[in-house]
Image (cartoon, helix red, strand yellow):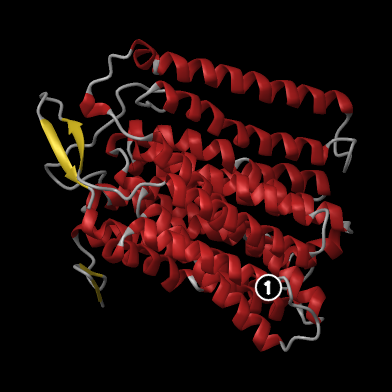
Amino acid sequence: MNTGSINLLSFSGKTKVLHLSWIAFFITFVIWFNHAPLMAVMREQFGLTPQEVKTLLILNVALTIPARIIIGMLVDHFGPKIVYSILLALSGVLCFFYALSDSFEQLAVTRFLMGFVGAGFVIGIRMVSEWFPAREVGVAEGIYGGWGNFGSAAAALTLPTLALLFGGEDGWRYAIGSTGLVAILYSFIYYLNVSNTPKGSTYFKPKKSGAMEVSSKGDLILYLLMNLPMYGALAVLNWKLSPANLGLYGDGVALLLYGLLCSIYLIQSFKVLQVNRHVLKGDLPEIDRYSFKQVAMLDLAYLVTFGSELAVVSMLPLFFLDTFEITPVLAGMVASGFAFMNLVARPSGGLISDRFGRKRTLSILLLGLSIGYFALSHIDASWALPVAVAATMACSFFVQAGEGAVFAMVPLVKRRMTGQIAGMTGAYGNVGGVIFLTVLSFVEPALFFLTIAVSALVILVLIQLFLDEPEGHMAEVLPDGTVELIEVK
């Protein structure tokens, strides 16, 4: 099988790194969504209320918001090889703790902590961008993201059956624990078989750590503003769990968490200003400049593409179960159709972007996404199940191809900060997940799908107004002071 100049049947050089990286991402996604297809069993065993179920879905994506920012910084500084290996091992241990939970509170805490595994995606984005040139990076990142993202579908397809094979009321525990064991074993395989860059290449690191570098005062203001929604999403989650809603903890804890979020934002803002004080003085060399609005627009596009996927993948098994009154195993299988399209859709989004223009591709896919969710908003029990599944898969093609189009552009903004840019863009995907799942906790699924459709149209207009097509070259300075030009078209 050959995609462009990428021979996917090869297992050497850059293709070997691509295969090992998407498998790592695949495993993290199996872990991240190993609860969704088993939620019906857990709901019955723990006597969970509908609001408690929705709370677990929101908790699953919450920690990933700051985690992707942190992981992005760590990847740029330490390299993807060691960071991915450690993340896989830690996520495996967290799986064991989740499987041993015996109350809603324990499920909630461990599910929240397991959200950290969702940051694994960012690591491979930097790894793949180091090994593939601009003319191939879209399809390579699409393969990485799409085949890795299929882990959520694999979890939906296999874990209910695996739980039945283990048998008994604890079958779901063994099924989830087994995913953790796989992650720990693969952490060693990944570490022993990859390197951060091809032999002879330079791994560019940010000049400063702790925050992203920007190029102008306007970009600095935009950067500070774009950080707000990430804290806002966490504040919404805090409100959802506070006495004003679910009452998982008291008013004192809720106020403490609000204060903590405000403090962290102020500390981060101070760090942003500290890292970018040269911008305030106006002495930034031209070679270090880039347009931060590119990052902002990609953030918003990923909010509605991956953010909606996070929310829909989390709720779809129960949606099909309750709408069509089918078995949990069948519900997991048909719901997996949404994530199944990742195998071809996300690589297709990257490939089309490489060939026909990145902004144009992203715009068309956002329009298709909006139409697809509008169609899903009309699904009810009167639909034939095969038609509902077909509509779901058609919508998911535009969703995941849109994700591929976003990350066909992310590595082409500024190479030495690819991890941080990918981290922020990825975090916005989780912001979208929290927003859409919060909407779901208040409305029926039809209005939930319609909310996503309208959001996509708004972001499409912003993309048309503010996103620029990548042109020319990125410039990076080698350790010896010479300049390397990296093609972006």
Residue shown at 77%/63% (left/top)? 447
Q: Residue 263, relative to residue 89: is it above or below?
A: above
Percent of width and height locating residue 224 = 52, 26
Residue at the front extreme, as displayed: 465
Q: Nearer the viewer, residue 303 or 92?
A: 303
Q: Residue 475, relative to residue 303: is it above or below?
A: above
Q: Which residue is labeled 1 in the image?
A: 376
In the rendered structure, the answer to whether residue 440 lies left or right of residue 429 reads right
State the SS at label 1.
helix
Can residue 180 be seen from the camera position used here?
A: no
Q: Residue 115, relative to residue 239: is it above or below?
A: below
Percent of width and height locating residue 395 = 57, 72
Number of marks in the rendered image: 1
Q: Nearer the viewer, residue 478 or 366?
A: 366
Percent of width and height locating residue 353 = 33, 62
Percent of width and height locating residue 234 = 68, 36
Q: Residue 347's image quarter?
A: bottom left
Q: Residue 235, relative to residue 277: is it above or below?
A: below
In the rendered structure, the answer to whether residue 448 lies left or right of residue 179 reads right
Residue shown at 11%/24% (left/top)? 481
Q: Quadrant of the N terminus?
A: bottom left
In the rendered structure, the answer to whether residue 154 lies left or right of residue 236 reads left
Q: Looking at the picture, which amino acid does disc 1 mark? A: Leu
Can residue 476 be seen from the camera position used here?
A: yes
Residue shown at 43%/46% (left/top)? 122
In the rendered structure, the answer to whether residue 85 lies left or right of residue 205 reads right
Residue shown at 34%/21% (left/top)? 208
Q: Residue 339's image quarter?
A: bottom right
Classify 10 Å Cα crowding around label 1: few (below 14), some (14-19), many (20 and above).
many
Q: Nearer the viewer, residue 127 or 466?
A: 466
